[in-house]
Every structure is written in structure tokens, then in C-alpha cells.
Image: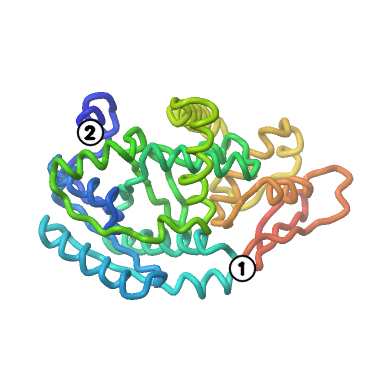
Amino acid sequence: MNRIQTKTNLFRSFSPDARYLIGVSGGRDSVALLRWLVDLGYRKLIVCHFDHHLRGRSSQADARFVKKLAAKYRVDFQIGSANVRALAKKKRMSIETAAREARYSFFAKVAKRRRCRTIFLAHHADDLVETFLLNLFRGAGTAGLAAMRQVSTRRIDKFDLVVVRPFLGVWRKEIDIYLREQRLKFREDASNKNLNPLRNRVRHRVIPYLEKMLGRNIRQNIWRTAVIAAEEENWIENQLPDSSEVELPVAKLRDTPVALQRRRILKWLRAQSVADVGFDLIERVRSLAERDARIAKVNLPQDRHARRRAGKIFIE
């Protein structure tokens, strides 16, 4: 764990004297991250715990455990909750997507209220590998393959939340060693062994099979590819125009290469807080800029629309 400090410049940008949020579920990864940050001198942490109402009494026990943990380390505690199952049904999305949206919405609300724009999350190297494969199987481009970065900005309800993942270079087995060394207790989520969610099937079935068939270094190789994709994506994003504009000029968009058109539309849609931005959605919006386009309006998620009028594309 010490190599995170010695081999990265990450913490030069995040002074221990400032206030930060930290997402803590009560599981092994977030418990390890909380202890590690406290030991590094981060004393102004705000522990954020979100109850998804998916595990009954176990969810309530998780909340009590995290609250006691925050008290033990003498840091602030904030709790949020939502009926994620009902939310997923209402918005016609997967449980995982609904849970993520609800969780980040809670983080953003706490960040606004506490005047803190940065949150630490405990995603690690195995999570990065799993996410890379999931997005690859879904047909994502490099933007999707670079979905997890050590430092990124997520726009939520017109609020920019800086997400920091210090453990992206740390493997699950290394976290387990750290937990044993520090004798840390954590909450075990039995649903992690349920093979119905796609991520769990990738974790427990697909990756072990690939390791058996292709060699034991496959996790490290996939991790390296994901890191390269993330670094290239950062560079590409910095080359694109500011995405804060409310309207996209059709003529300028049309005159750029197709690859940059897609990138610009992706960045713009995310800045407008459009959910579930994928290839098909980007292509529908891009079709509005075609010279012979016969349509001037396309559907977006959550009953929103992208429309072309007077040489501009905007959202209504």
C-alpha cells in the first residue's frame, strides 16, 4: 500500500488539511481506504454511506457499522437512502445503473451542502479490469474503456464532482493482506456471490476462465490497457472545445472528422447531465448535423430531446 504514496503524484493535489468526502459502504475496500486515509493524516473526512434498500436488515446493519466506524475515527458521517428497485422500474433502467445514479446524486447533494467538491472512492485494480471487460463486451469505444480513472470529474445535476480513486493500482488480494495486517473488521455483502448480475459473472466466471485459457498475467495486461486508454482519453478531452456551451453549432460540428464529432457530442451530452450516453445515442444526435438530415429532433433518456433549429443543436 505504501507504493501509492511513493510512486504517484496523486496526493500532491489533495492536501490532508482540506475537507473531502469518502464513500464507505462498509465492505472491505472502503473500510481499507478509510483507515488508510486516516493514517495518512486526512482528519476532515466526511464519511458518506448510501442505503440502496436492496438487502433488507443487512442494509440497516451496514449503516450502523459505518456510523460507528466514523465515530471511531472521529470524522463526520452522512447517510442517504433510496428505494433503488422502485427507481429502476420507474426510469426503466437496470438495478446497477439506478443504484449508481442514486448514489452519485447523494454524493453531489452532500458535496454542495458541505462545500466540498472532491470524493475518495475505493475502486481498485480488479474493479478496473472488470469494468474494462464489461464495456468492451458492450461495444464501447476508448471513452468507455477508460471509464475508471484515478482522478476524474463527474457532472451531476449541473454540479462537478471530482472523483479520486487512490486504489486503482492496488489489487483485491493486496487489500485483503492490508485488512489482515491492520485487523480491520468489515461487512461482507453476500450478494457479491450472486451470479445474476453481469459484473459478478465476469468476476467469478469469465476472468478465471480467461486466466486458465490464456495465462495468469491477463489481469495485469488488461489493467495496463485500461490505464493507457485512460491517459489517452484525458489527452483527447483536453483537445476538445469547452463543453459548457448550451448549443452545438451544426456547421462547425459537420466540418470536423467523424471521430471528433463523436467525442465532442459525448462531452457535450455529459455536460448537459444526459444519462446513459452510448454509441447509438451519440449517433442519433450526430445525425442532426448531416446535410441531408430529414429529422430535426431525436429522443434522449428521461423524456428529453435533442433538436436542431437555426443551425444549432440544443436539448429540451
Q: Quadrant of the C terminus?
A: bottom right
Q: Mark 1 points at which residue?
A: 92
Query: Which residue appears at 21% of the width and 65% of the height?
Result: 65
Q: Position of residue 171 (x, y in %)?
A: 33, 36
Q: Which mark is residue 1?
A: 2
**Left or right, residue 116 beside residue 69:** right
| In the image, residue 299 above or below residue 277 | below
Residue drawn at (40%, 56%), measured in percent from left and top? 192
Answer with left or right where residue 289 lies relative to residue 189. Answer: right
- Quadrant of residue 256 within the rendered picture: top right
Q: What residue type is labelled 1?
A: Arg
Of the pair 229 and 30, the residue shown nearer to us:
30
**Residue 238 makes an appearance in the image:** no
Return the x and y of residue 311 as percentages of the image width and height.
76, 49
Circles 2 and 1: CB atoms closer than 8 Å: no
| Label 2 vs 1, first from the N-terminus | 2
From the viewer's perspective, tell me whether residue 236 is left or right of residue 66.
right
Marks 2 and 1: which is nearer the front? Answer: 2
